[in-house]
Amino acid sequence: MTLEADVLAVFPAEVQIPAQLVADAVAASSAASPRVLVVLDDDPTGTQSVANLPVLTRWEVADFTWAFAHIVESQSQPAVYVLTNTRSLDPVEAAGRNEEIVRNALAAAGEDSAGSKLRLGFVSRSDSTLRGHYPLEPDVIAATIAEVSGEATDGVVMVPAFPDAGRVTIGGVHYMRGTGHDAGKLTPVAETEFAKDASFGFANSELAKYVEEKSQGRFPASDVIVLDLNIIRAGAAAGNGSAGDPELSAKAIADAIEPAAMSTPIVVDIVTENDFRALALGLEEAERRGKKLLYRVGPPFVRGRIGQEIREALSGEEAYEGNTPSTAGGLIVVGSHVGLTTRQLNTLTAQHSAARIIEIDVEKLLVSGAEAYLDETVAAVVDALHNGDVIVHTSRLLIKTDDAAASLKIARTVSAAVVAIVNRTLKTFPPRFVIAKGGITSSDVAAHGLEIRHAIVRGPMLPGIVSLWEPVDGPAKGIPYIVFAGNVGDDESLAQVTRKLSNTF
């Protein structure tokens, strides 16, 4: 591990940039021709860094029409999230879904009755620990845009950093921050458990080399444009006590992007929120000069890109605002198997003695007769909800296979069972709230377990992480839904969120 202070010592200080400066720049560029970012989120945890934006779990033209109208009517900031769940799909399925979504978004952005037309920017939101279908997804988005509109993509801007969750990029290297007694230390992300992912493993923490690795040499590391902190912070104050010059940073970023052509990968250093805002101003300038860009990013990028203030964590009262909370217990569903999730689950079960704990035996789901087992589990969950909170978790023994496709099939079988339990419970005895832990888990629970089609992201439940959605239609309308990534927070985080929402904890 490396000390963060030592790595940062060779770079300038951050440039202080208010969010409003970015918001004003975005508004100015949209004055003549309104622009909306369409965020293809490969699991729903990408919403944890934003607030008051629409999110879709379906992507027909009518769904985009609803989202675009909501943005205009509510005067919310110009972005919509589309829950693709492609991290749980094989490459062929993921490619087809990305293409369908882009085509439908572009169709919905066509001229309306007043003759106006939305400009769309596309964001491929993926994992801050570098797992996901890369470069497949940005490739498909770029190809679809070119086919539909004739517009070629000059550069794909890659920004996996997620400082709120401890992921930062410095000197072109992507790191994970230590916690507890390791606070202040950085571990290259390729040395963490996430790099050993059965479906999306990787060997390189240096992003330019990661690009070469994942593109199988199509994009050599030497061709990747690296926007390091010297460029992002080019407007840093020269020791005179000022906050620095954002315009200098914006110009340096746009100048560095100038050579990009034919989807050149552009990787970016980010350590702070000010770095995101500096990047946003630079991207605005590059696009003003005519550059056509796509984005492959971690969760906080959109917040910085549109100039949204950091939303403070919601209180329990705010989580239920506008709705009458049920007297039933809440439902906490845990599917993720990363070490952090297991520790969070252990902490919650140890502290929440009033909760009923129901384990889903994964081995029983993979054999014949699983339907009877599901019936028993649903009955137990419904019965327990009458008395308080219920924690439903998959068995912690992860059934592994060396075959990536087989691993995904097992994951889907387990997820389908979780969805069935949630959906049948919802239709029988609606819970007070639902928390879903894990990316694939929270995606499937949202779209199929709770049958959410349209929702509004209200904000985070913890500072910078863990998203609360308010379903605006379907059987879960009015029930707070908490999207909780498997790899964020500390050991206490799941218990903290549950305590905010529960009436028995």
Image: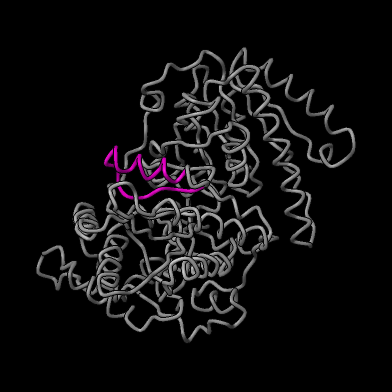
Whole-percent x, y for residue 478 in the image: 46, 24
Residue in the image at 50% along x and 52% along y: 41
- Reply above or below: 222 against 279: below
Foreground of the two, 261 or 149: 149
Determine whether, in the image, residue 364 is placed left or right of residue 258: right
Magenta span: helix, strand or loop, mainly? helix
Determine whether, in the image, residue 446 is placed left or right of residue 37: right
> Which image quadrant for residue 353?
top right
Residue in the image at 45% along x and 40% along y: 467
Segment tinted magenta in the rendering: 63-82
Residue 69 included in the magenta stretch of the image: yes
> Which image quadrant for residue 132?
bottom right
- Reply above or below: 359 against 132: above
Residue in the image at 79% along x and 24% along y: 375
Whole-percent x, y for residue 92 in the image: 67, 62
Determine whether, in the image, residue 365 is placed left or right of residue 148: right
> Which image quadrant for residue 369?
top right
The structure's colour scheme is one colour
Residue in the image at 61% along x and 13% along y: 387
Foreground of the two, 268 or 6: 268
- Reply above or below: 198 against 385: below
Residue 275 in view (yes/no): yes
Whole-percent x, y for residue 331 in the image: 59, 26
Foreground of the two, 222 or 387: 222
Query: Residue most toward the right?
Result: 368
Residue 185 in view (yes/no): no
Whole-percent x, y for residue 372 in the image: 84, 27
Residue 67 included in the magenta stretch of the image: yes
Q: How many marks?
A: 0
